Amino acid sequence: MKATFAPYMTTEVKDKEFETTMRRSNSPVAETWRTNTQSQFFKSSLGTMIRKPNQEVTATLQQKTEALKVMSMDMSSAARMQH
């Protein structure tokens, strides 16, 4: 198999500025892991249009739902034992 590239591509890739223009970000990778993506999302234009639900409220509602599931299982198993 043989691949032939257009001549303009090799000159573009050899250019010193090619790498910096192709990068999305010039910040180090370690900085990416330290950034708070949630606060960045709220600052973005999409974050101003779409509001994420409050995580604490969502977690509380999920816990209540799980508790109701457990209670309903207990009640149904207790009802079966009495018969």
Image (tube, rainbow, N blue to C red):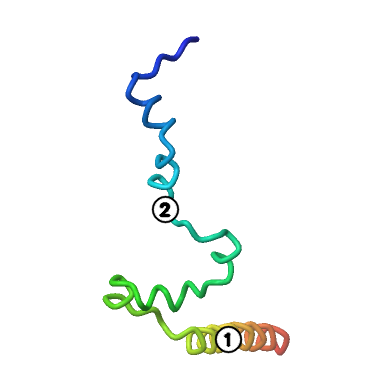
Disc 1 from disc 2: Cα separation? 40 Å
Q: Amino acid at mark 1?
A: Gln
Residue that appears at 64% across and 84% down: 70
Residue that appears at 36% across and 26% down: 9
SS at badge 2: loop
Whether 76 is drawn above or below 35: the answer is below
Residue that appears at 32% across and 24% down: 8
Name, please, the residue furthest toward the top. Answer: 1
Q: Position of residue 38 (x, y in %)?
A: 46, 76
Name, please, the residue furthest toward the right. Answer: 81
Which of pointers 1 and 2 lies earlier in the amino acid sequence? 2
Callout 2 crowding tier (Cα within 10 Å): few <14, some 14–19, many ≥20? few
Q: Is residue 64 left or right of residue 20?
A: right
Residue that appears at 40% across and 45% down: 22
Q: Quadrant of the C terminus?
A: bottom right
Q: Amino acid at mark 2?
A: Arg
- Asked which quadrant contains residue 40, the reply is bottom left
Q: Position of residue 28 (x, y in %)?
A: 56, 59
| Mark seen at residue 24 | 2
Q: Position of residue 72 (x, y in %)?
A: 59, 86
On the image, numbered disc 1 is attached to which residue?
A: 63
